[in-house]
Image (cartoon, rainbow, N blue to C red):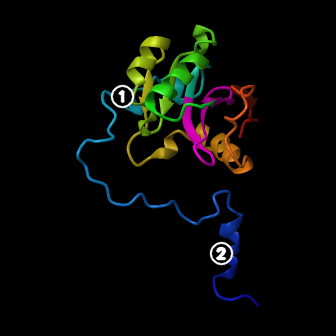
Amino acid sequence: MQARGALRKELFRCLRSGRARRRPHGLTVNNGQGKIRGRVSITGRPAEATDRAVPGHWEGDIIFGTGRSTIATLAGRHSRFVMLLALPHGHGAEAVADALSQALTTLSAQLRRSLTWDQGTEMAEHARFSVATGVPVYFCDPHSPGSVAATRTPTGCCASTSPAAPTSSPLRKVISIRLPPS
């Protein structure tokens, strides 16, 4: 016989995040600080990206490791191909834009059609990124981070299986994997 709620707590510990709910972000002051200027909503994304019919549409996110280590993830919407990019110089807007530019410019033009990002300010340099790569950046609507669903599984799996983000080794600049279709 278990105490009341003991089974529920045990099941919550088995979740990948180890907690029952998302952590609240607290109260924020809406003074415009931290807002991304000139962002284009996900509703402006081409229909071919929404239905995953054509390769070249990407979704991105950031994984925070222990200490100051961070990884950027890019997941192809069509093929579910995932690229993990080490960010040894932090997760500031300039560092993320440079790492993403360097990774995407190695691909052919047919595989560089669009990038969808959540509301993170690490893509505040999206205009510079778009000029350098020719890839338009679309942002999720506020309070709906699940609209970048293709990166949630690889991001969560990588974060939960790795004790630290792999930024310490110079040999691990870009790691590419392909997930099976869900």
Q: Amino acid at mark 2?
A: Lys
Residue at position x 53%, y 63% in the image: 21
Q: How many marks?
A: 2
Badge 2 local density, few (<14 within 10 Å), some, or many (20+)? few
* The C terminus lies in quadrant: top right
Q: Main secondary structure of the magenta part?
A: strand
Residue identifier under label 2: 9
Residue at position x 51%, y 59% in the image: 22
Q: Which quadrant would residue 17 be assigned to in this image?
A: bottom right
The region drawn magenta spans: 59-85
- Based on the picture, tell me whether residue 72 belongs to the magenta stretch: yes
- Based on the picture, tell me whether residue 34 belongs to the magenta stretch: no
Above-or-below relation of 6 to 60? below
- Residue 78 shown left or right of residue 29 in the figure: right
Residue closest to the eye, 130 or 33: 33
Q: Secondary structure at mark 2?
A: helix
Disc assigned to residue 40 = 1
Residue 49 % position (x, y): 53, 25
Q: Amino acid at mark 1?
A: Val
- Residue 104 shown left or right of residue 177 in the figure: left
Above-or-below relation of 149 to 15? above
- Residue 61 shown left or right of residue 66 in the figure: left
Residue 42 % position (x, y): 42, 32
Badge 1 local density, few (<14 within 10 Å), some, or many (20+)? some
Residue at position x 42%, y 12% in the image: 131
